[in-house]
Structure formats: C-alpha cells, structure tokens
Image (cartoon, rainbow, N blue to C red):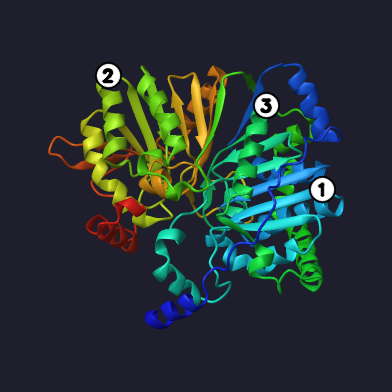
Amino acid sequence: MLALACLLAGCAGLPPRAELPLEQALPAATDGVIAERVAAATAAHPGKSGFHLVADGTEAYALRAYSAQAATRSLDLQTYIWHDDLTGRLLARQALLAADRGVRVRILVDDLDARAKNAGLAALDAHPRVEVRLYNPTASRSGTLGKAGEFATGFKRLNHRMHNKSWIADGRLALVGGRNLGNEYFGASDGPNFVDLDVLMAGPVVAEVVANFDRFWNSPSNYPIAQLSPEAASETALARLRRVLEESVAALDGSGYAQVLREDPSVQDLLAGDTRLHWSAHWRFVSDDPMKAGLPPEQRSEVVRALLPEIGSTRQRLLVVSPYFVPGERGTRELLDAAARGVDVRVLTNSLAANDVAAVHGGYSPYRKPLLAGGVRLWELKPGGAPARFSLAGSSGSSLHTKSMVFDGDRAFVGSYNLDPRSTSLNCEQGVLVGHPELAAELAALFARQTEADLAWSVALEPGGGLRWSDGSDAWTRDPAATASQRAMAWLMRLLPVESQL
C-alpha cells in the first residue's frame, strides 16, 4: 500500500508555482471605527505601541469577530489551523461579509490543516475580494493515500510548517499569540478547551506585523489555492458555502455561547471602546523566515535569537509557560545557568494527563530530574485545570496552549513559540517582546493563578531521586490521572530517537 502511495505521489508532485507579482498590504485605514479609535489612542501616546493581554477565550473570539465586522479596508489573516466548527464558521462568515463590503481579505493557512478544509477555503477564494494561499501544500487535495505517499517521498519539505498566528484588521489592529481559529481556542468546545493567550496590539508595532504577513504572503513556500484546486473555487461553491455559514448564525443563537458573548465583561468593554492597552516604546516583534528550513541550523530561529539575551540578562525571576516543553540540551543549560546565578526559574507545562500530544510528553519527561536538581521549579497543569469560564456544554477538561515568558518582572514575551526542537528548527514561529512592568505583572499574575494547587501539580525531586507530584492535599509518585494509552505513548516516545521532531 505504501509503495502504491509513493508511486501516486511521484506522479502527482506540486506543479511549478504560478508567477505572482509582489503584493503589499493596503495602506492603513483612515476611516471607520477601528481607525478612529486607534488614531485617538495613539495620539495620546506618541511614539508608543499599545498592548493588551487576551487570556479569556470569549474575548479572543469577540475581538476577531468585531474587528472583522468593523473593518473598512483590509483583513490579513494568518493561521496554522482554521477549524470547520461553530466559531471557525462564524469567523469565516465575518471575513466573507467584510469582502462583500469591499474589504480586501487575504487568508494564509498552513496546509497541514487546510487540506481537510480545501473545499470551503477554495469556495471563499471564489469571492473577488478574497484570496486564499496555502503554506507548504501537498499536491493531493483529498484522500489519505496520495497524502501518505507525498509525506513518504517528500517528508523533509512537508515536515516544515507555518505555526504563526496573526489577525490584522485595517492595518491598525493586530492579534498575535497562541490561538488558532476554532471552538477549543475560544472557550466554546463541548470537550477540552485550551488555556491560551493572545496579545492585542495597536500603534507602530502593527506595521511590523503587517510587513511580516507580506513577507509570508509573497514567499515561494505558499501557493494560491486556486492554482491547486481551480475546480473548487467556483461561484456555485461560494453560494453553497454562504448557506452553510448562515446556518452557523442560527446555531450560535440557539447556544449558550451567545449569552456568554452578551454577558462577558471583557466583550462589553470591547463594544464600548474601553479595552485598556499598556503603552510602551520598548518592544520588538520577531518572526522566523518563511524559508526557515533552508537556513543553517544556528540561523533558523529568530525567536530563539531574541529570547536568549533576555534569559541571559535576567537576574531575579524567569517565568516560562510552554505547553509542549522539550528544552533539549541547550534549553536545559540556559535554564540551569539562570538558576545557578540565583534566578528564580519557574516553568509551567502540561501534565501527561492534560497534554493533547502525549508523544511530546515522552520528550519532556527525561528533562524533569536534571532541571529540578539544578533548582528549576516545575508545575504541570491538571487536565481539569483552568477550565474556560464558559462553553457550549461545559468543558470536560483543559489543556495548556499558552506560550509566554516574563523576565525580571519588567519584560514579557507572548507568541506561538514552544520551547521545543520543532519550534526552534522546523516550524515558523513569531512573537512580541514588550518592556512594560504593568504588562509583565499582569502576565506574572496569570502564571501565579495557573500554578495554584487547584489548577496544577507542583513537581519535586524526592531525596531518593524519584519524582513527586503534589497539589497540597494529595501526592503521587508517577504522572497523576494519566490513562494507560497516554503512559504507553509517552514511554514509547522516550525510547525512539525522535526528539528532534517534537
């Protein structure tokens, strides 16, 4: 079967990419509610950019939906995953309605996820004001056999993914961080919801996010979906998609999530224009090169090159949140060096029971003992820890998806970067560093809450060399609450030489 798949893949490789002119973002909007609000705020803080942490999933959804509704000129949307679920469809509908108003909509999606939604994305592309491009796509657009063959014959290329997430409205507002587009990122899932984090930005920093979107948009690593699926990008398909998307409005009206959106205080602040921003002239937006895979290993991660000096200059406290935490030799050394010079190093990651990718836990677990022995403090999120405040039917659990760091209480990082080999060497990542004590304190307060005993287990090294998990009332000597299948997967991953892929 694999031989047949490889044969099919060999006969159906990617065609040469169409010659496309370089395309730049439209000038930032000068009219409309977004432009008016941002202009007033930036005028009061000349030379500075504004930052607002978005920890609440409901607010994260509302910010995206509202900015799409309010946009008058452009929407530039970049994501790793765009789910075909309630919130995913609602956001697609808002993008389509914006295009109907004349807004230019550019959508860039990593093809690892987009392939499964090919028909819907291609239908969106049929709108004259919408263009969809796919990052590092497969030639096969449906079925598993051709995809398996392409991965077998072209694994090196297809193993490189775009993990960036940006939502840019009118060139005036930008959201970046850890969230993809789908129910579990917005507190709307019937199952586990992610504990995640974005940062809303306004001011000069947005121009850099826009320029980075253009860099990815014009990269030879992406293809217009219309080139790969010309038959799917039709007016008939677009009309069919409109009907499906309109049904999502009725689904929302009949759900508890609509009431959540009406009652959430952060959403009310947004609608009233009262969302509070922290203003700073000290910031740095960083992003990996879209052609990262072709660079020498030591030059691949712009994010790492930005974070290492911050870690090295930290003198008092370093807070790290990484859901997929496989620090490797270099990362372990950096954390241990910080602890050795007296820095209070604290790390929050997923427990085995909470991790949605149990294989990653197998890569993380060997580093626990050396980190703890060197003075690093560890917490692991419980599977029921930090549940979303609201969901369609009540969350059955939660999994950590936040990627953040706090340095000495005055500098903060939020982005898509996990402290693991995949983020460092294989996937494109991005994030923003901000120097602002109040913003850093806000992020530190989130860390403190998420590591409290009701939400996370503290992990300690026992005198005999074993590990001990505790939540203040109970203690365990092996990964708490994990299923047999999770333990088996983590054990297998510890045996296999796959750390570089995690």
Indicate the quadrant where residue 239 lies.
bottom right
Q: In this rendering, would 12 be left or right of 62?
A: left
Q: CA distance from mark 3 to mark 1?
A: 22 Å
Which of pointers 2 and 3 lies earlier in the amino acid sequence?
3
Q: Give the residue type that dot 3 points to.
A: Pro
Q: Give the residue type that dot 1 points to.
A: Val
- Are the residues flagged by discs 2 and 3 in contact, CB closer than 8 Å? no
Q: CA distance from mark 2 to mark 3?
A: 36 Å
Q: Give the residue type that dot 2 points to.
A: Arg
Q: Secondary structure at mark 2?
A: loop
Q: Which residue is mark 1?
A: 103
Q: Which residue is mark 3?
A: 204
Q: Which residue is mark 2?
A: 341
Indicate the quadrant where residue 72 lies.
top right
Q: Nearer the viewer, residue 143 or 300?
A: 300
Which of pointers 3 and 1 lies earlier in the amino acid sequence?
1
Q: Secondary structure at mark 1?
A: loop
The image shows residue 66 at horizontal and vertical percentages of 76, 43
Question: Which of label 1 and label 2 is nearer to you?
Answer: 1
Q: Nearer the viewer, residue 207 or 41?
A: 207
Query: Which circle marks residue 36 in the picture?
Result: none
* Residue 145 showing in the rendered view: no
For residue 271, above or below residue 366? above
For residue 93, above or below residue 432? below
Residue lying at the far left in this picture: please name it.
Answer: 464
Q: In this rendering, would 435 be left or right of 253?
A: left
The image shows residue 71 at horizontal and vertical percentages of 80, 42
